[in-house]
Structure formats: structure tokens, C-alpha cells
Amino acid sequence: MYSKTVMDHFKNPRNVGTIEDADGIGELGNPLCGDMMTIYIKVVDDRIDDIKFQTFGCGAAIAVSSMLTEIAKGKTLDEAKKITNKDVAEALEGLPKNKLHCSNLGADALKLAIKDYEDKKAGRPREKTPPDQHLHTPEEKCYCPYCDTEVPEGQAICENCAFSEEEPAD
């Protein structure tokens, strides 16, 4: 079910914690599974000098956060922005299909932390992204947070698994 690498990062997560004077913070959650990730970065000379995470969620979410921090540490901001959910999943030697959404959370939380840093540096007020929204740039494709199938921009329901980003009616 889980690779040895996933189990290692779950049982022995790297870079757990917070950075009190973080240069950037990215918070993201998934309402479908309840996972919540916060990524903290410290930037020196346009490089991620330190990175920490706090994750509330399943073993896959913890492993994704741990691996993401290992991949991103020491990278330039431009290099770190290019880290994708697929990169994280591949570094973990795969994730079960129903856990691929966790890798989306990690990559997107890192992008939010970088955006937070860049906004602070430019003097722009911090934009709060709702914790249940994923982030991507126009040139990136949008993927279902549950099954990782590509979903056309603006389409609210995944045709593969029927996941809906719309709020259920009360």
C-alpha cells in the first residue's frame, strides 16, 4: 500500500515545527479529508534557507510535508515554485490513488508561503487564501484534489470520481 519511503517520512518526519520569525507562511487544507498543512520558510539570498511544517492529517499528508521540505530546502525561490505535486509523489515512490490529493496540498502550501514572502517583500498586504482552496497559476493545469485527474478550469465536478468543490447544501 505505502512505499518504504512514505513510511519512513511518516514515522520519522523531517523539518517538523514552526519558524517564529518566518519570512513566509503558507496554510492550506482539504475539506474532503480534513488534512491541514502549514509551511514556514526562511529566505536568505533568494534561497529557502530553512523550512518547517506543521500538518494535521493522515500519514500520507505528513509524509508529503516531510518530503516537500526536503526537496525545497536550499532551492532558489524560482526553483521551489516549480515543485509540483507529481514531483513530491514521485520522490515518495508513489502514493495510493486516494491519497494523491495530499501531494497537491504540499506543493500548493509551499507556493502560498513563497507568495506570502514575496508580498511582504513588495509591501503588499497579505492575501488570505481560504484553507479549502488549491492554488495554481494560469499556465498550470488544474487537478482534482481527490483523485488527481486533470479537471478543465472552471469545472466544479470531477468527471472521474464525482468530487465536487461546491459546498454541499444544508
Image (cartoon, helix red, strand yellow):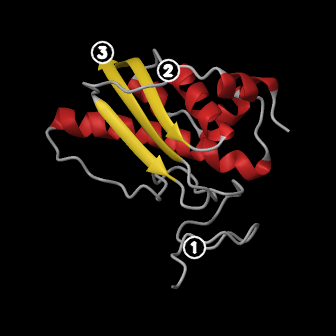
**Can you see residue 76?**
yes
Q: Position of residue 31 (x, y in %)?
A: 54, 60
13 or 109: which is nearer to us?
Answer: 13
Give the labeled residue for mark 1: 156
Q: Earlier in the sequence, mark 1 or mark 2?
A: 2
Q: For numbered disc 1, what is the local secondary structure?
A: loop
Give the number of the mark in front: 1 or 2: 2
How busy is the neighbourhood of tag 3: few (under 14 within 10 Å), some, or many (20 plus)?
few
Most extreme residue toward the bottom is 170
Mark 3 or 2, closer to the camera: 2
Residue 44, percent from left and from top: 30, 15
Q: Residue furthest right?
A: 1
Cα distance between the residues tagged 3 and 1: 39 Å
Is 74 rendered above or below residue 19? above
Which numbered disc, 3 or 1, marks the residue that appears first in the sequence? 3
Q: Secondary structure at mark 3?
A: strand
- Give, as a three-letter code, the residue at label 1: Ala
Amino acid type at mark 2: Asn
Q: Residues within 10 Å of mark 1 (few under 14, many from 20)?
A: some
Residue 46 in view: no
In this figure, which residue is indicated by the disc labeled 3? 44
- Ranked by sequence position, the earlier of labels 3 and 2 is 2
Q: Which residue is more in the foreground, 45 or 138?
A: 45
Give the image location of residue 80, x and y in percent: 47, 28
Q: Amino acid at mark 3?
A: Val
* Residue at (86, 39) in percent of width and height: 1
> Which residue carries the number 2 mark?
15
